[in-house]
Amino acid sequence: MAKIATLTVDGKNFELPLVQGAEGEQAIDISQLRSRTGLITLDPGFANTGSCESGITYMDGEKGILRYRGIPVEQLAGKSTFVETSYLLINGELPTREELTRFSIMLNDHSLVHEDMRTFFEYFPRGAHPMGILSSMVNALRAFYPEIPERGEDEETNMMFTRLLSKVRTMAAMSYKISRGHKVVYPRHDLTYCANFLNMMFDSPVRPYIIDNDLVKALEVFWILHADHEQNCSTAAVRLVGSARVNLYAAIAAGISALWGPLHGGANQAVVEMLQQIHDSGGDPAPFLARARDREDPFRLMGFGHRVYKTYDPRVKIMKKVCGKVLKKMKRHDPLMDVAMRLEEAAVKDPYFKDHNLYPNVDFYSGILLRAIGIPVNMFTVMFAIGRLPGWISQWKEAMDDPHWKLHRPRQVYIGSKVRDYVPMEKRKRPKN
């Protein structure tokens, strides 16, 4: 027997069906609420509202669980590659050896960017933020690579996915090189996805880049940990824009723009800046913890707390371990790592942070890892975007394939002026102070 919830309004009862997820979570289906009652729900920030049913990513904020297509992220970070994880997210299953080889070849074949796009890059002001450039260039991809009508729909869609995964990585490295006035480095057929990116970023005619497998693995883990995260701000933007049946490039460009925000993808940069501030003030985190506890102080402790996780973000331990391994391998001492560890130790013992479920999230150590690899701070959010790309693609694909698809059109509760008449210009007056 199907479970129901009962809503009572003015003494009248309305039965609403309950929907149960694969892991036992339940939701009240209010899709017919307005037609049956004349009411809507009000949920600022959509913290309690499910926008879709999805089979891609499972999160349990209370237990600190994150799985892609049912596989724990810890297993993928330890055993998988970013390309394999991307295939899993987009196609629903881990690839066979033949499927992975074919996918890798397609990524390699589509890695070059149309030469005319370089002109677009060069006309952006030198001070333009890489995320703004990336969003614009992804949108422009539709003009350079329109759908090919003579191909089958599935074949063209798969090509569009691989084209995006491959070219966004190339465009990101290209934008970095052009911003520095350096010669653009083209992708190599003999390098893997992650190794190719590092080579395109750091190789130069005067100092050839030496591929370090430990750094490649660290980048693999970084991107795997960021590959998808349920219905976050940027993913919701991709689904919302995609619901208008726009092309994938436009939907992904919207996701990149949403990710740009300091409360979302820009948080890792904000964490590094905060840690630097603590270091420059003597390295003692106590005054900053006190400021974070003070409700009258606008200061926020970046890298702590999460809208979903009420315990440790499961990605944090992995990221922290990789950070330590990379720094040790490179024989580099980063004072910000010391500050971060002192801050984490003090915060998790502080009653205020424990009571408010403010534990470190993935952004807390990810910026330190990117610094160790050599990524400049203004490219941090771009790195997040590359990692999140397979998640965005899989979410867009799932929404497009949904037989119950609907154009996203949230309602509102109007609190403005009631009906009033138009006032002619000569009769309009403002009260004097």
Image (tube, helix red, strand yellow):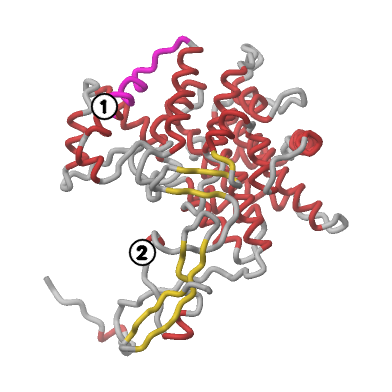
In this view, which residue lies farthest toward the top? 331
Rendered image quadrant of residue 353: top left
Q: Which residue is mark 1?
A: 278
- In the rendering, at what x and y percent does residue 288 appear? 21, 33
Identify which residue is drawn at 60% across, 35% down. 172
- In the rendering, at what x and y percent does residue 284 appear? 21, 23
Identify which residue is drawn at 48% across, 48% down. 59
Confirm whether the magenta stretch covers residue 338: yes
The kind of residue on which mark 1 rests is Ile
Left of 126 or right of it: where is 358? Answer: left
Confirm whether the magenta stretch covers residue 162: no
- In the rendering, at what x and y percent does residue 49 appear? 43, 64
Identify which residue is drawn at 88% across, 57% down. 150
Answer above or below: position of 406 versus 113.
Answer: below
Q: Which residue is mark 2?
A: 44
Q: What stretch of residues is rendered in magenta?
A: 331-343
What kind of element bears circle 2?
Answer: helix
Left of 305 or right of it: where is 59? Answer: right
Answer above or below: position of 20 versus 73.
Answer: below
